[in-house]
Every structure is written in structure tokens, then in C-alpha cells.
Image: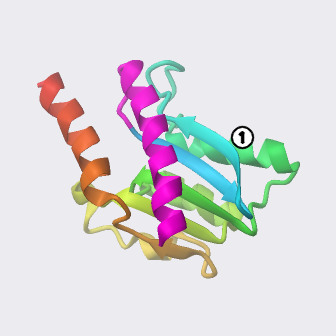
Amino acid sequence: MVDDVFYMKLALQEAFKALDKDEIPIGAIVVCGSKVIAKAHNLTETLCDASAHAEMQAFTAASNYLGSKYLKDCTLYVTLEPCAMCAGAAYWTQIDRVVFGAYDKKHINVDKKTLYHPKTQLVGGVLEDECASVISDYFKNKR
């Protein structure tokens, strides 16, 4: 759990980079062993691409780093529970673990566990309050 908190703080740093670009502040990193191999944040506005979520950017960077489409022995840390698209992408990467901060209360009725690879371990609520407040503050300021 101590490592999960440490790495989630790095994902939060990525979320603040997204915030600086006026993107929805979600950050993600991929860790393999104890090494950070990818850092990413939302780029949907910057790239004018609805699929440019933090997780998708992190998966691409990690796959390029490893030279493999599979992210076995890796963990994704992301500040918000992945959406169905990102969970599906995680399935195809066969990533070992997905650790997220805030729960996605907007899509609470989706059984996301069935979207992941059966061997993928899900851990939620790591630094939940910090992760949730970054996103909720962003939307409060937008309205």
C-alpha cells in the first residue's frame, strides 16, 4: 500500500499537468518492477481526440518502452477509475494491476470488472480524496 500511495502521487502530478493545459485533470503512470516506464495525462482537447485519455497515452508509452503490446508485470496508476474504453484497452494489454484513486460515480452501474482481463487485479480508492478533489474542483471552476 505504501508503494501504491507513492506512485499515485506521481499520477497526481500528471493530473496537474493536464490541469495546466485546461484538460480534465486525470493523470496516469505505468510501473514495471519498481521503475516508472510511462507518464501521461489527458490530452483529449490538445489532440482533438476523444480517445486521448491518460490511460491510453500511458499504455502507448509503456508499450513503446517495452517493445511489446503486452504489459505483463506492470501496474497502471490512474487518478480516476478507468472508463469502459480504457478498461477494455487494459484488457488487451494484459496488465497485471490497475490501481486508481477516485471512483467514477458517473458510471457506477457499469460492471467494469468484467471489462478487464481475468488476471488483472483492481485496487481502488488510493488517495481517493485528493484525486476526487482535483477533478471536482476543475468542473466547479468550469461551471
Q: Name the secondary structure under disc 1.
A: helix
Residue that appears at 34% across and 58% down: 127
Residue at position x 70%, y 68% in the image: 94
Query: Residue 72 in the image: x percent, y percent?
Result: 75, 68
The image shows residue 88 at horizontal and vertical percentages of: 56, 60
Q: Amino acid at mark 1?
A: Ala
Q: Residue at x 67, y 43 (%)?
A: 38
Quadrant position of residue 119 = bottom right
Residue found farthest to the bottom = 118
Q: Does residue 48 sit above or below 13 in this rendering?
A: above
Measured from the top left, where is residue 82 in percent x and y?
Answer: 44, 56
Whether residue 104 can be seen here:
no
In the image, what residue occupies the spot 23% across and 54% down? 106
Q: Residues within 10 Å of mark 1 (few under 14, many from 20)?
A: some
- Choose between 73 and 117: the one closer to the eye: 73
Q: Quadrant of the C terminus?
A: top left
The residue pinned by badge 1 equals 61
Above or below: residue 138 compared with residue 37: above
Q: Write down the region rendered in magenta.
A: 1-25
Judging depth in this view, the residue of 6 and 49 nearest the camera is 6
Q: How is the image coloured?
A: rainbow
Q: How many marks?
A: 1
The residue closer to the viewer here, 127 or 102, is 127
Q: Of helix, strand and loop, which mostly describes the magenta segment?
A: helix
In front: 36, or 50?
Answer: 36
Tell me where residue 104 appears, x and y as whole percent: 29, 57
Q: Is residue 21 magenta?
A: yes
Question: Image check: 125 left or right of 115?
Answer: left
